[in-house]
Image (cartoon, helix red, strand yellow):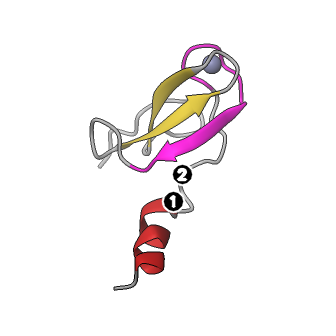
Amino acid sequence: MSRAKLKDLIETKPPEVPDHPPCAFCGSEKTEFIALFGQFLLVSQYYCHNCHSAFEWCKWQDEGGNVKRNA
Ligand SMILES: [Zn+2]
């Protein structure tokens, strides 16, 4: 596998992961995707440019912000 392809895999996020989810701390949408996997496999890591905090976004949250429990 080429280095470019590997880089592509690492930096490409799946479509179900939002580009700019609201910050967990301040609610700002000035957020940036930084990593597909956080501390747990079901979260992605984001950085908030408003309050300069990193936070984790659960991939299985619904639009109301509740974790789906019907899996
Ligand atoms: Zn914030």
* Amino acid type for the residue under numbered disc 2: Val
Q: Are marks 2 and 1 in contact (CB under 8 Å)?
A: yes
Question: Which quarter of the rendered picture does the N terminus lie within?
Answer: bottom left
Residue labelled with disc 2: 17
Label annotation for residue 47: none
Mark 1 lies on a secondary structure that is loop
In percent of width and height, residue 3 lies at 41, 77
In the rendered image, the vertical position of residue 46 relative to residue 19, given as above or below: above
Q: Is residue 31 left or right of residue 15?
A: right
Amino acid, disc 1? Lys
Quick check: which quadrant has ligand 1? Answer: top right
- Residue 61 in the image: x percent, y percent? 47, 38
Q: Is residue 22 left or right of residue 42?
A: right
| Residue picked out by circle 1 | 13
Q: Position of residue 48 (x, y in %)?
A: 62, 26
Separation of residues labelled 2 and 1 (CA atoms): 7 Å
Q: Is residue 4 above or below residue 63?
A: below
Is residue 29 found inside the magenta-colored segment of the image?
Answer: yes
Q: Is residue 42 left or right of residue 22?
A: left
- Residue 28 in which image quadrant: top right
Could you tell me which secondary element the residue under label 2 belongs to?
A: loop
The rendered magenta stretch, by its main secondary structure, is classed as loop
Residue situated in front as seen by the camera: 67 or 19: 19
Front of the two marks 2 and 1 = 1
Q: Residue at x 49, y 26 (%)?
A: 54
Please provide the residue range marked out in magenta: 23-36
